[in-house]
Amino acid sequence: MRYGLLWVVVFSYGLVPTLEAGDSLGSYTIDLDGITVSGVSSGGYMAQQFHVAHSELVRGAAILAGGPYYCAGKGYPFNLWKTLSKCMKMFFFWGPPNVESSIEATRLAAARGAIDNPENMNTDKVYLFSGTLDDNVPQPIMDTLYAYYQEFVDAENIVYVNNIPAAHAMITDDFGNTACHLMAEPYINDCNYDAAGELLQQLYGPLNPPIEWKADSLLTFNQSDFVDDPEAHSLNVVGHIYVPQSCVEGVNCRLHVAFHGCLQYEESIGDVFYTRTGYNEWAEANNIIVLYPQTTARTYLLLPWPNPAGCWDWWGYTNSDFHLQNGVQIAAVKAMIDRLTRERSDQSKWTGIRGIMLRSGFKTLQVSARPGINR
């Protein structure tokens, strides 16, 4: 959230508990055409750049209070002036950002194979949300993101909600700050609007009504399995995932990745982002696995640098490839998805091999059924 409110992190950083690593992430039968992402604030920026970087994999994206691809540009830390005054508003707003710059950066990155072909996004579903009272990421920034997506996505597949008097926060219909105009911890506002439900229905189409989620289905996993020394890259050692029991039992499920915003990592606000924002209720009713990757604050000695608020990297504090497939945070989340979908990927490989054998005149061997293969 706004940097002017973040320095408290620097002074409390040594007081927050250290999280212990969880179990290894499992694999499930996941519909490879049902992988979508969403995020708020810095998580909105991350969801958007993950969608663009892996458009062959991701089938839809929802961005709340974020901005266009590669908005901050290159040259960290010298690009911080643009980060703080064009891609968000810290003290002054000199935006909005130039949509043509984002479009050009996308095409150049795709031309050199650093991201997938953006034409993959043409049939994707997109949901955008910008509160009329958001003074941290003003609506002109989200308007630019809307124009960006219109360049690559069929206009009929884009929903842009920009008429709700909400501040910079994740929006719910039953939890958070009841004053919708407020920007304060946990940066979740009860505005009588179910953003999680609305965005999931835009991404997936009509869904069953939400039902009570089950505590036993909320799991913790070790993010160290997917990146060396995660805290050096402002990633937490633990992540969270909601897996309905039906998905554990082998039902074909979809996968949604939900990125929290700045100051919404676990040591800052506890578990409320992954328990109270509404995703789990919809997931339980509709066979959707929800992955909640986690960041952490990263400071240097007593300096509020480079990421005191646990934001996702959309301006280059990890490295200059932050917006590309080999960016450390994007690569880590992609590795998590690969692990989750491994069972279906193994099945697809087996099906492909079997098809080749049949077309080549070979007889297939009779083998015992194994996980990930439907016989």
Image: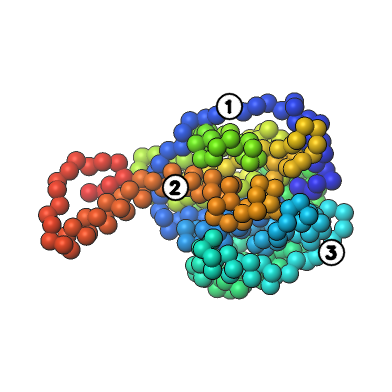
Q: CA distance from mark 2 to mark 1?
A: 23 Å
Q: Position of residue 31 (x, y in %)?
A: 40, 53
Q: Nearer the viewer, residue 123 or 303?
A: 303
Residue flagged by tag 1: what amino acid is it?
Answer: Glu
User: Which disc number belongs to residue 94?
Assistant: 3
| Mark sitting earlier along the chain (1/3) | 1
Whether 237 is drawn above or below 101: the answer is above
Question: Which class describes the residues within 10 Å of circle 1: few (<14), some (14-19), or many (20+)?
Answer: few
Quadrant in the rendering for residue 269: top right
| Mark sitting earlier along the chain (2/1) | 1
Please give left or right for residue 4 compared with residue 348 in the image: right
**What colour scheme has been applied to the protein in the rendered image?**
rainbow
Please give left or right for residue 355 compared with residue 122 in the image: left
Q: CA distance from mark 2 to mark 3?
A: 40 Å
User: Which disc number belongs to residue 338?
Assistant: 2
Find disc 1 in the rendering and name its residue: 20
- Is residue 345 at least partly visible in the picture? yes
Residue flagged by tag 3: what amino acid is it?
Answer: Trp
Q: Nearer the viewer, residue 81 or 336?
A: 81
User: Which disc number belongs to residue 2?
Assistant: none
